[in-house]
Amino acid sequence: MKKILFIVVLSLLVAVVSQAQAKETIKIGVVLPLSGNMGATGEMGRAGALLRLKELQGAAKFDYKLILEDDEFVFSKTAMAVQKLKNFDHVDVLITMWGYGSDIALPQLKNSPNILHLNVDRWTQGKGENDFVCGASLDSHIQDLMTLIKVLGYRRIIFIGTAEQGTESYRKKLLSEAPPNNIQVIDNTMLSSEVRDLRTWILKAKEQNPDLILECLQMPAAQILLKQMHDLGVQIPVGHASQGVLEAEPSLKENQWLIYPSTPKLAWEERFKAEYHKDSIYAAPQFYNTLSLLINAYERSDGSRKPTTHELADSIKSLGKFDGSTGTLYFAAPNKYEAPVSYYIFHNGKPIETTLDELKKLRFKLKN
């Protein structure tokens, strides 16, 4: 009897293992900076992506395999990583971050119709049938920025940003939308990610007597700007339009504001902290959202076979919306899932979601 029971149990185990082995593997290449100046951001991105995979707990229809490549935020290494994932790993999906990632990846994928490209948090729309973006759109971001600047009473502003595709698109949109809103951009500067001394630029900006410096910088440039302004005693108000400031020294950004897509909801933040024993920062929730979009699209199939790239693209579009770490993201034609834009104020180094009225009160308080 025991022998029969053992055989039955063994047969069931073999059946379960065989069923698990029958799952097709989805190879997902991810290019992000896991070391270098943006290493902390990349590590958070990896943590967010892995958290989404862990939540599947074996219940998924496919076996999702992440292949992570560190580009150190060095564009030549980004190109090499894309080549490896495309030609050696033969990934089904390639995920890059920000405008620079798309700039480098899309030309290399032009003749690879079997690879779907997802970009984390670039402001522009997807390009073509196999390119999708998960993040806030440039139009909604700039529209809310114009409202914020007018409510706070700023009229003469200076823009400074990191020279990459996403920020360049942001700069051009800002320059086109400012005049109709009676806002004057008196100077605008794009910097290499390698810049370490902004003192000359800061002193020149002071001479122009702006109402506001609007920065859209990556780290460490955001930290350098704030630190060197502090050291020089230059007290021009600074507003932030990029996630880079989230990693800057807390005392340098107290009571400054940030306009950016929503931070994680409390329940998600608690799950993240339980898994990693620390708070999340950008880009953990953004990579979590992007993996959620991809997995939700794959899991809509019956699982009998791996969807083609065309079928996957159709599935992504037809989702319409999905719940992510920052709330509900909605499809915006042609190829983007839109994250809501929110206003934040920094207290004790943390971005606290706020309203235009509260920011206006703070502006009045600081002036007086």
Image (cartoon, helix red, strand yellow):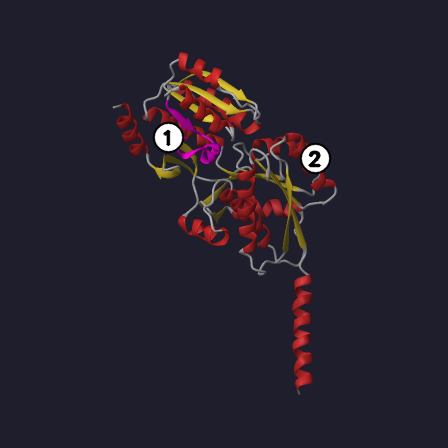
Classify residue 246 by image quadrant: top left
Task: Tally the marks.
Answer: 2
208 over 322 or under it: above or below: above
Task: Assign the C terminus to one quadrant of the image.
Answer: top left
Instruction: Decide if residue 87 is on the left or right side of residue 233.
Output: right
- The residue sitting at the right extreme is 88
Query: In which image quadrant can residue 250 be found?
Result: top left
Q: Which residues are magenta?
A: 237-256
Q: Nearer the viewer, residue 335 or 174?
A: 174
Query: Mark 2 sits on what residue?
Result: 80
Where is 146 relative to 47, above or below? Answer: above
Q: Earlier in the sequence, mark 2 or mark 1?
A: 2
Q: Is residue 254 magenta?
A: yes
Tell me: 283 left or right of 366. Answer: right
Q: Amino acid at mark 2?
A: Met
| Picture coordinates of residue 186, whole percent (x, y) | 43, 15
Q: Which residue is mark 1?
A: 256
Residue 55 can be seen in this image: yes
Asked if residue 173 lies in the magenta stretch, the reply is no
Identify which residue is drawn at 61% across, 58% down. 61
In the structure shown, which secondary structural element does the residue marked by tag 1 occupy?
loop
Q: Secondary structure at mark 2?
A: helix
* Residues packed near mark 2 inside 10 Å, few (<14), some (14 to 19) or many (20 plus): some
Say which residue appears at 46% left-offset and 40% top-offset.
339
Q: Residue at x 29, y 30 (%)?
A: 362
**Mark 1 Cα within 10 Å, few/some/many (few <14, many 20+)?**
some
Q: Position of residue 333 (x, y in %)?
A: 53, 38
